[in-house]
Structure formats: C-alpha cells, structure tokens
Amino acid sequence: MVGDRLEPRYSILLADDDPAARDTLREIVAPLGYRTLVASDGMEALEIVRQEIIHAALFDMHMPNMTGLEALQALRLFNADLPVILITADSNAVLMRQAFQAQAYSVIPKPVSRNIVLHTLTRALGRLRGDRIH
C-alpha cells in the first residue's frame, strides 16, 4: 500500500445480482486502482474466473442460478487459493459454518461498510503477497 492507494495490478471480481450492490462495491474498490470485473450470478462469476486472472473475489450469498456459497464450492475444484469474501444480509451460525467449510476468506455483512470491505480485501491480497498480518 502506497499512501492511501492500493497497488493497481490486482483484479477483483464482484458478483452480486443487484446492480446497485455491484455499483456500490465497484465505487469502493475501483478508485483505489484495482481492476474490477463484475458478474450478476455465481455461474457468470465462475466463467470469469476461468477466463481472467483474478486476485480476489467478493460474492453475494443470495444470487439466482448459483449462490455465492455454491460458486465458492465449485471454484475450489479448480482454484483452491483464490481469496473469496462472501457478502450476506442474513448471517447466521449455519451459514458461517458452511462458508468457512468452503474456505471462504471472510464473510461481510450487508449493508457493506467501505472500511470493512477495504480492510478485508487488503488482508486477503496481503496473503497473496505473503505479507505477515498481525
């Protein structure tokens, strides 16, 4: 991290069926120099991950065709290391257990907080770089 700007070489995938939610995530992430790609459901997100170099992803839990959790589980079959942050409006113990069993990097509540998204994303990308996080 240089000053208040993050390294621009990272590509972040934002998957949410709600266009306003995708726009909000993009408004948080893009101004810091990240390349952003968007998907409207889990199936589209998986297709993007297969075609593009993605460094981290944010998946909404509740999307049509394939939920964020289902997309994460399918993703792990061909990309075990991609940090995926799940976003949900209805966090509960069962969902949290399922998310971490599927190796989600983190789960963020909706409505999203800019600071929480950026902090979580920075930590996830730091793990890719091998940063030691205390």
Image: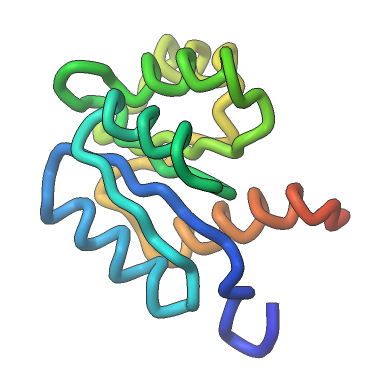
Q: Can residue 134 be seen from the camera position used here?
A: no
- The location of residue 103, given as percent across then percent down, is 60, 22
Residue furthest front as drawn: 51
Location of residue 2 by image quarter: bottom right
Residue at 46% across, 54% down: 12
Examine the rendered structure and indicate whether residue 127 appears above or below residue 119.
Answer: above
Examine the rendered structure and indicate whether residue 43 appears above or below residue 109.
Answer: above
Q: Can residue 78 be seen from the camera position used here?
A: yes
Q: How is the image coloured?
A: rainbow
Numbered marks: total: 0
Residue at 52% across, 13% down: 97
Compared across the picture, whether 61 is left or right of 117 comes to left
- The location of residue 98, given as percent across then percent down, is 48, 12
Foreground of the two, 50 or 116: 50
Which corner quadrant holds the C terminus?
Answer: bottom right
Compared across the picture, whether 95 is left or right of 85 comes to left
Examine the rendered structure and indicate whether residue 23 appears above or below residue 73.
Answer: below
Examine the rendered structure and indicate whether residue 91 appears above or below residue 13.
Answer: above
Foreground of the two, 14 or 117: 14
Which corner quadrant holds the N terminus?
Answer: bottom right
Location of residue 101 by image quarter: top right
Location of residue 123 by image quarter: bottom right
Residue at 37% across, 14% down: 70
Residue at 68% across, 31% down: 81
- The location of residue 45, given as percent across then percent down, is 34, 34
